[in-house]
Structure formats: C-alpha cells, structure tokens
C-alpha cells in the first residue's frame, strides 16, 4: 500500500477517488458547456422523456450525448474533466521546462520538475535501473531462511521507505481519541484487488485476470514459468485467507472497529509469532504508550499465517505486493503490466499514450510544487470571499436544522451546534506549504538518479515526516490534499471542511451564475461536507475532533433506525441489475440527503431559485462509465452511482415536489412517509 493514499482514504471525499488522478479519463472533451439552466415548465422531449419521471436523464441528456468515452477512458464526469484541464496546463509547464536550458537552482521547483520528467521519460534508464534501491530489500526478503529473518527484512524496508505488505507497516496520524496528539497506527495487510472483488459473485472473472497478472509480474521479475505459477497460486491462497478476516470498506469507516488501543506488551500477545520489541525498534516507533491496531481480526489471521511452513508463500506475497506498488516507476515492461491490469479492471481497451502517463506521474510525485504553480494562476481572493459567504449561510441554516430535530435532547443539540460553530474551514491552499514539499528532492539521471530512486525518495519523505510529527502537538492548519485537487473533504479529526482551489470553478461555482445555480453547485458541495460532521461516522467525533460518544443511548438508537431506512431506500435502486449497497454508501447518502434539504431550506420556496439549484446539482453529477468501471464503483465506492445520487436524493426532498408539482403517477414520486433523511 502506498502511504500517501492512506490519509485520503481516512477522510471523507466528495467524489470517487481512485488514487490515479481522474479515473481512467485520458483527455478533456472540448466545447462542453459548464452551465446547467432551469427546466421548470418544460414539456417532455421528442422521446417523451419528462423531468418529472427521470430528472437526471432529462437534465443531462444533451450533455451526455456529447460524451463519447474513447477506448482509453473508463469514466467521465466534471471532476475528471476539470482535473484533466488542470493537468494539461501543468503538462505545458513540464514541456516548457524540458526545453529550457537554464541552470535552475538545485531544490527549486523548476529543477525538480525538469529532472523528474527526464527520469520518467528516459525509458533506457528505467529499463537499466529496474527496481533500483528496492532490489536489495527484495533480495533480503527472498533470501530469508526463517520467519524471524523474513519479518526483519520487511521491517527494514518499512522503516526506511514505508512500504507495507503483510506486517510491519505503520502510519503516524492524529490520534482519533485525542486529536491534538499523533499516534502510531499499525497497518493491515495489503489485500491487493480487495475483499470485495475476491469474495464478490460478479467479480470472479477479474480475480482470474488478477491471478494471471500476478504470475506475469513474477515472470517479469525473473522467475521461471513453474515458480511464477506456484508463487502466484501461493499469493492467491494467502490473499483469500487474509480477505476472509478483513474489515469491509464500510466497516473501515467505523472507529468502534478500527480504533483498537494496544500497549507494546499487548501487541506481543496479538503477534505471538513475531518479536514485537525488535520490530518496533526497527521501525523507530518503540517506547510509545499506545499502538492502534486498525484491523484486529485480520492481524490475528496474519499472525496465524506467520509459520515456517508458510515461509515461501509469505515471501511470494510480500514480493508481489512490493512489485505491484513499485511497478509504475520501474521498467517499461513492469509499468505496462500494471497499467494493463488497471485497464482490465476499469474496462479500458486502449492503452494511454506513454507521454500522457509520464506527465501524470511527474505531477503525482511533486504534488506541492505543482500546487504552488497552480494557485498562482487559478485562485481569486474575490471568489474565496464569495464562497465564505455561502459557507456562513449554510452553517447558519444547519444550526436551524439541528434545532428542529425533536428526537434530540437539548444538551445534545447544543453539542451539535458547538460542532458547527467550531468547524474549521480551509479554502484554496495552505498559508504555509507542507514541509514535505522541500523534503522531496529530485536527483537527476546525470547524478545517478532514476525514476525508481526518486520514487523511493518520496516514500522516504513520508516516513521521515511522520517520525518528526510523533511526540509533537498536531498542527491543525496543515493540508494533506494539494490545491489542484478537484474534490472537497470533511476531516472528522480536525472537525474541518476543505475546499481546494480547483473545486472553486464552473460548473461547481461561477460568480456569474444565479444564486440558485451556485447554491446547487458549490452550495450543495459545502452542505454535503458539513453533513459529514453528522453522518454515521462523523457523528462519532466531537467538536474537538475526538472519537467520543456525545449522544444518549436513545438518540443513538433513533439515529440507527433512521439510518436503516436510508439503507433500505437506496437498496431499491439498481444499476446494471445490481442493487445499490445501502450499507457501503450510507454515510455519503446521509450527506447528500442532508445537503439537498439544507440548500432547499435556504432557498425557502423560491421556485425559480430552487429550479436553478436542482438542475445545476443534477448537471454537476452527470457521468458516463464503462460497464466494468460501473461494477468497480458498485463494489467499492462509498458513493452511490451519480444518477442515483441525483434521483434518489431529489425523490426524498419535499422542496423538489413543491418546485415541480410532482404527482403520484410521476417516475420521481416517492410517498411522503417513504422519503428518507436524517438532517432535514
Ligand atoms: Zn462525501
């Protein structure tokens, strides 16, 4: 597991995030209008389609007719569209610097970008250096003669570069129970294609492809045919065992399951087959009062697998995880295998151009250098002030929504209001760039650098930065997400909402838009993030960002009853014959339902403004997917598919009925007693 993704996985994202920029979207669609526009009073179209029957389809049919996924795309939406547009501008900067002969100062963004791109695109160098500094670590794992030697080898690699495969992975993050402090989280084993695919009924063909991929990676690594096959079989055997006791994605959002405090001594009792003292020393994290085990049941399984008879299988497992983690940065053959598997998973039938991949990799490894360049061009103080006004309106409205909940006691309401009042807001970009920006340096090919060595450097920066934090007070002004990210977040540990610069643009926000359109655009996004503070997971944290129960038992019971009705409601919706997983998408659905109710309440019966807001919201969620990618989303994404996000939410929103005079015979109609939501 690549360390940089972990923090993002733990925060709550607005849109699908696969960790590879826009999910399989290779180029922008030119000439698309970023404007929605109301539909009130419009008649059925030539095909008889009415907004009263399928609002999403009616709003987006013209737009989606213009979207044709190319063979190298898996998905289209506005998030990806804006991401690609930002990426293309950065591409021009990379190309410009590559042609520039200026001797840039070592450590400057210009030097780092130019030299890194030279490493990425130097395929001869990549093929020569191969696994570079990772190789001796892999050799040590493969030469281990005992479980003790195997664990030592993993610890040495994790301690220096933060790679984790089965055991020895850790991450330093804010302590959930005391968010002013940092704590050590013991990571779970990497489950590769994931439990959802391994155990899913409709996903077994992908699992078979994955097994071939494992074998091919071993062949590329240099194993003979027989050994590659048997190693791949061993990896699959362990993978199934590990997945069987791994938390599901929805469980991983539940701190009552993931926040398990252990002392070093108790950790030794959990990992009876490992010398825990030795491991903690090797990782430079010994002497802590507590260690948080994220997935206890999985840890027990891992411990039971750490036996001498499994040694060869364990070595194969770790080898493959590391090859998979590093493949994109290795030889061209390994990178192609990696991308090929991703393409198969997402339904992409045509490979991306090499140059597209190289430019994206360069940007991903230097997020803060590109972030600094991005905000120089793309951030307006005026827009920030306008958005701050909308945020203030929404927080105010939310207070009224909290106050009218008759199932909450006065004391609990006051705590909820305090959580709103103390909610921290981050907009645009950080006042101070994170220290990782300067810690990340790039060594050019001429000085012995390679893509792999620079990637390893970025991993090492993550480790060293984490260790510097440990023991100090948490810096809540710090940003974990760069400003060019087209997304928004709620972070429960800081009780904060974050809107990077890149989300403050059309179609989400435009200062020329009507009030209603901006309310359905950025307003919906803001209200969605605010609701996350009170969703099934966010509600378990108090106003200080600490995991603590501030509800009475009766309130918690009522909350669960309301949640169950939301789970059942979404389960009725289907995509490609698959029911939406109401449990997996619960927190996001609570956020969407709360957001729609909040903005509708602000617009207070103004039908024209509500029409603009609903149609803009539906427009912003337009999407097109390959069948494979949709299946991937249905199995793993904590958000419902976009079409359902729009139609299910509006069908439960009373103001939608009043705005459009929806009747019982209309497709969008849901009886009042069957409409769901918590914060409304
Ligand atoms: Zn969300």
Image (cartoon, rainbow, N blue to C red):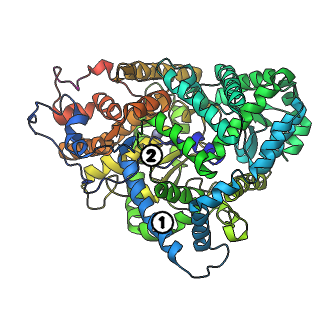
Q: CA distance from mark 1 to mark 2?
A: 28 Å
The percent position of residue 229, horizontal first and vertical second, equals 67, 27
Residue that extends furthest to the front in the rendered view of this protein: 225
- 384 part of magenta stretch: no
Q: Which residue is mark 1?
A: 374
- Residue in front for this viewpoint, 284 or 385: 284
Can residue 666 be found in the magenta stretch? yes
Q: Which mark is residue 351?
A: 2
Q: Could you tell me what secondary structure mostly forms the magenta stretch?
A: loop
Q: Residue furthest bottom?
A: 102
Dot 1: element: helix
Image side of residue 288 versus residue 497, left or right: right
From this view, report whether residue 110 is shown above or below residue 514: below
- The reply to whether residue 680 is visible in this rendering is no
Quarter containing the C terminus: top left
Q: Secondary structure at mark 2?
A: loop
Location of the N terminus (image quadrant):
top right
Q: Quadrant of residue 108?
A: bottom right
Side of 185 relative to 18 (left or right): right
Q: Which residues are magenta?
A: 665-669
Mark 1 CB near ligand 1 (8 Å cut): no
Q: Look at the image and tell me whether residue 446 can be seen.
A: yes
Residue that appears at 47% across and 64% down: 90
Disc 2 crowd, CA 10 A, few/some/many (<14, 14-19, 20+): some
For disc 1, the neighbor class at 10 Å (few under 14, some 14 to 19, many from 20) is many
x and y percentages locating residue 276 in the rendered image: 88, 34
- Report the side of 602 relative to 666 (left or right): right
Q: What residue is at 30 percent from the left and 61 percent from the top?
A: 511
Residue 391 location, x and y as percent?
A: 42, 52
């Amino acid at each position: 597991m690549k360390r940089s993704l972990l923090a993002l996985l733990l925060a709550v994202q607005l849109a699908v995030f696969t960790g590879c920029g826009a999910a399989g979207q290779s180029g922008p669609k030119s000439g698309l209008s970023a404007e929605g526009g109301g539909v009130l009073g419009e008649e059925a179209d030539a095909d008889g389609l009415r907004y009263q029957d399928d609002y999403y389809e009616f709003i987006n049919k013209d737009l989606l007719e213009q979207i044709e996924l190319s063979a190298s795309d898996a998905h289209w939406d506005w998030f990806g569209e804006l991401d690609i547009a930002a990426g293309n501008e950065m591409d021009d900067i990379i190309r410009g610097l590559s042609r520039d002969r200026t001797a840039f100062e070592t450590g400057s963004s210009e030097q780092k970008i130019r030299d890194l791109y030279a490493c990425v695109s130097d395929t001869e160098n990549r093929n020569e250096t191969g696994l570079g500094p990772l190789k001796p670590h892999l050799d040590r794992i493969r030469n281990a003669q005992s479980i003790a030697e195997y664990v030592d080898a993993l610890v040495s690699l994790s301690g220096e570069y933060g790679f984790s495969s089965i055991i020895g992975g850790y991450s330093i993050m804010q302590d959930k129970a005391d968010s002013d402090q940092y704590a050590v989280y013991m990571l779970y084993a990497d489950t590769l294609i994931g439990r959802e695919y391994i155990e899913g009924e409709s996903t077994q063909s992908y699992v078979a492809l994955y097994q071939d991929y494992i074998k091919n990676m071993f062949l590329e690594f240099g194993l003979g045919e027989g050994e590659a096959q048997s190693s791949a079989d061993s990896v699959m055997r362990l993978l199934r065992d590990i997945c069987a006791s791994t938390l599901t994605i929805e469980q991983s959002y539940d701190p009552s399951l993931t926040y398990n405090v252990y002392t070093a001594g108790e950790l030794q009792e959990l990992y009876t087959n490992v010398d825990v003292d030795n491991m903690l020393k090797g990782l430079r994290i010994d002497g802590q009062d507590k260690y948080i085990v994220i997935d206890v049941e999985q840890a027990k399984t891992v411990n039971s697998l750490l036996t001498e008879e499994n040694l060869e299988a364990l070595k194969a497992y770790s080898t493959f995880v590391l090859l998979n983690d590093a493949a994109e940065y290795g030889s061209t053959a390994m990178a192609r295998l990696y991308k090929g598997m991703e393409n198969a998973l997402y339904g992409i039938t045509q490979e991306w151009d090499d140059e597209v991949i190289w430019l994206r990799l360069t940007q991903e490894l230097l997020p803060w250098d590109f972030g600094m360049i991005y905000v120089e061009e793309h951030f307006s103080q005026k827009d920030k002030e306008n958005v701050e006004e909308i945020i203030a309106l929404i927080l105010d409205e939310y207070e009224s929504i909290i106050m009218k909940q008759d199932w909450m006691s006065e004391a609990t309401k006051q705590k909820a209001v305090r959580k709103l009042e103390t909610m921290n807001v981050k907009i645009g970009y950080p006042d101070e760039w994170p220290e990782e920006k300067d810690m990340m340096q790039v060594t050019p090919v001429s000085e012995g650098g390679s893509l792999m060595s620079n990637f390893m450097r970025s991993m090492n920066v993550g480790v060293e930065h984490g260790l510097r934090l440990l023991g100090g007070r948490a810096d809540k002004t710090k940003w974990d997400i760069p400003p060019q990210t087209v997304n928004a977040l709620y972070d429960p540990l800081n009780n904060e909402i974050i809107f990077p610069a890149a989300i403050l643009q059309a179609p989400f926000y435009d200062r020329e838009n009507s009030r209603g359109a901006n309310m359905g655009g950025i307003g919906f996004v803001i209200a969605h993030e605010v609701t996350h503070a009170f969703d099934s997971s966010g509600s378990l944290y108090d106003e200080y960002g600490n995991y603590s129960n501030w509800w009475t038992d009766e309130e918690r019971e009522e909350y669960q009853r309301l949640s169950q009705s939301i789970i059942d409601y979404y389960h009725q919706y289907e995509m490609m014959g698959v029911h939406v997983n109401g449990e997996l998408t619960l927190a996001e659905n609570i956020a969407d339902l709360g957001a729609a109710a909040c903005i509708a309440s602000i617009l207070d019966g103004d039908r024209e403004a509500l029409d603009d807001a609903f149609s803009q919201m539906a427009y912003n969620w337009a999407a097109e997917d390959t069948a494979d990618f949709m299946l991937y989303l249905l199995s793993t994404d904590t958000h419902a598919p976009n079409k359902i996000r729009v139609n299910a939410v509006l069908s439960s929103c009373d103001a939608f009925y009043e705005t459009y005079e929806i009747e019982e015979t209309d497709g969008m109609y849901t009886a009042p007693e069957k409409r769901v939501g918590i914060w409304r």
